[in-house]
Image: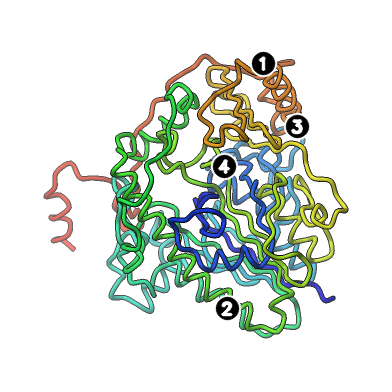
Amino acid sequence: MPRPNVLFIMTDQQRFDTIASLGNEQIYTPNLDRLVRRGITFTNGYSSCPVCVAARLTVRTGCDPPTTRVFSNGRSEPVSGQAETMEGRCGDYLARTMNNLGYRTFGVGKFHTGPWNEEVGYEVQLHSEELYGSPEQRSGDAFAGWITREHPEFDYIEALMGERTEMYYMPQVSPLPAHLTVESWAADRAVEQLQVSDERPYFGFLSFIGPHPPFAPPVPFNRLYDPDRMPNPIAGSRSVDHMDEQIPFMNRMIWADEINDAWARTLKARYYGEITYIDDCMGRVLDAVERRDDGDNTLICFFSDHGDHMGDHTAWQKESFFDVSARVPFLVSWPDHLPQDVRRDELVCLTDLFGIATHGAGATQTRDGFDVLGVVDGAVSAREHMFGYYGEPGTDRFKIMARNKDWKYIYLSNGHREQLFNLNKDPDELVNQADSERRVTANFREVAKEACRHPGAEDALDGEDFKSFDYTRWNTERIYQFDSSRGVKGFPDNPEDVLNDRSAK
C-alpha cells in the first residue's frame, strides 16, 4: 500500500463534549459526526499543557513541556544541558520531519508561534493569527492581508474575529459575513492545497482559530441555539473548584468574574454556534479529501489544543486540569487501514500526534509521546499514566496532573494542595478525595514526582518531595486586547480623545 496522505485538523478551545454523535444531543455537528464514523474516537484524549502556545508546541515537536520548556503562553529558559533552540532540544518540527520523509507539506491557519511569523517547516505556510501587534504584523498576516487586498470594504474592522477585552465573554455576532471569516478563508485555502497535483503524498495542517472566544459566529450561525435550551454550568464547592488559584486569577483577568447562569447559557449558545460554523466549513475540506482518488488512504486527525471551562467549576478559559479544560476531542481515521466508527478509551494526548503522523509515513518517531497506531495494531501496550504540566517548575505557578484509567491526581505548588478525583464515580470532578483516599493519593504523588525527574522539570522538586509555597492569592489586572496594529492600546482617559484623534486623521 502506498504511504497515506496525512491531514491534521485542529480547533482552538473546543471541549471534548461538543460532538453530537459522541453524546451531545444539543449540538449539530454533521461533519464531525462524519469523522467519528470514518474512524476511531479516543475518548480519553488530553492536552498535556492546556493553553495555546504550549499545547501547539507539543503537537509541533512531539515533546512534553519539560523538553520544550514551555509551560504556559510564555517560555522558560532551557536548563543546563538543553539546547538553546526549540528544534535543538526536540528535533525537527513535525512539518520539517514529514517533508524530509518525502511529503509535500502545507499549513493554514493559527500557529501562535514566537516570533509571530516563525517558519516551522511547511513548504506553504499561510498563517492567520488573532491579534496584530504592529502594522507589519497585520499586513503580513495571510488572512488580514487578504481582507485588505480582496475585500477592502471590511478593512476598517479592527477586531476581525470579534471584540475582545471586556467583550471577551460577551455573546456577539461576527463583523464579517460567513463566506469571508477567517474560518471560511482557512477552509478555502486548505481545499486549494488539496487540489494541488504532486506525486508526493501530502501532510497538511488546518488550524481554525475558533471556537476560542470571543464567541462571534456569523449570520445565521449566531441564532441556531436558544439559550433557554442550554444547560446551566456545573459547579461544586468553591473550596474544591477554586483550589487552583489560576481559576479565580484568570476569571478576574479576562472580565469573567461575575458571569451568572443566564449569561453563561447565552455564551454556550454562541459557543455552539461557532462550533457548528466551523463544522460547516470543515465539510468542504472533507469533501475535497473524498474527491481525490486517494481519499481512503488519507489519515485524518481531528483535535483541539484544549477546552474551555464555560462556567463549569465557576471558571472560564482554560489552564486547569479539570477535564473541561484539559480533555479534548481526539479523532483518528484512515479507512484503508483502521476500523471505522469505533470508540477506544486508552489515554492519549497531543504529544502522540507526532508519532501518529510519522507512523503513517513509515518512520515512527514517538519522542515524548506514544505510538498510538501501534497500540491500535496490538504491537504496543497502552500507557498506564498520563501526565500534564502547567507553570514553570520551581515557582508557585507549577502544577502537575497524573491520571490513570480510574483516577486523576493534581498537585498544586501554590499552597502544597492536592486533588484526587474518581472519574468513574465523579465524572464532573466535584468531590476531592485526596484526604479520604490517602493510599491512592500517596501512590499518585510518587508517580507524579517521578515524572518530574526530568532535567526540564526537576526544579519542581525539593529533595524527595515537591517544592511548595505558602498559598498566595495572585494579584492581577484586566487584560486589554485592542488592535495594537492601529495604535489602539486601551480605553481613553476621556471619550473625546478618541473622537479628536479620528477627526485629525
> What is the number of the mark on residue 33?
none
Residue drawn at x 34%, y 38% is 256
Assess disc 4: are there few (<14), some (14-19) or many (≥20) residues with their C-alpha within 10 Å of its C-alpha. Answer: many
Tell which circle, 1 or 2, labels the residue nearer the N-terminal end: 2
Q: Is residue 326 above or below residue 266?
A: above
Q: Give the residue number, with chain letter if any, for mark 3.
A: 454
- Residues at marks 4 and 3, CA–CA distance in whole angstroms: 22 Å
Tell which circle, 4 or 1, labels the residue nearer the N-terminal end: 4
Question: Which image quadrant is residue 75 in?
Answer: top right
- Residues at marks 1 and 3, CA–CA distance in whole angstroms: 26 Å
Q: Is residue 22 above or below residue 475?
A: below
Q: Give the residue number, with chain letter if any, for mark 1.
A: 438
Residue drawn at x 72%, y 63% is 96
* Amino acid beneath label 3: His
Please, what secondary structure does the residue beneath circle 3 have? loop
- Residues at marks 2 and 3, CA–CA distance in whole angstroms: 44 Å
Assess disc 3: are there few (<14), some (14-19) or many (≥20) residues with their C-alpha within 10 Å of its C-alpha. Answer: few
Question: Which image quadrant is residue 239 in?
Answer: top left
**Marks 1, 2: nearer the viewer:** 1
* Amino acid beneath label 1: Arg
* Disc 1 to disc 3: CB gap under 8 Å: no
Please, what secondary structure does the residue beneath circle 4 have? helix
**Marks 4, 1: nearer the viewer:** 1
Tell which circle, 1 or 3, labels the residue nearer the N-terminal end: 1
Task: Specify whether 372 is left or right of 423.
Answer: right
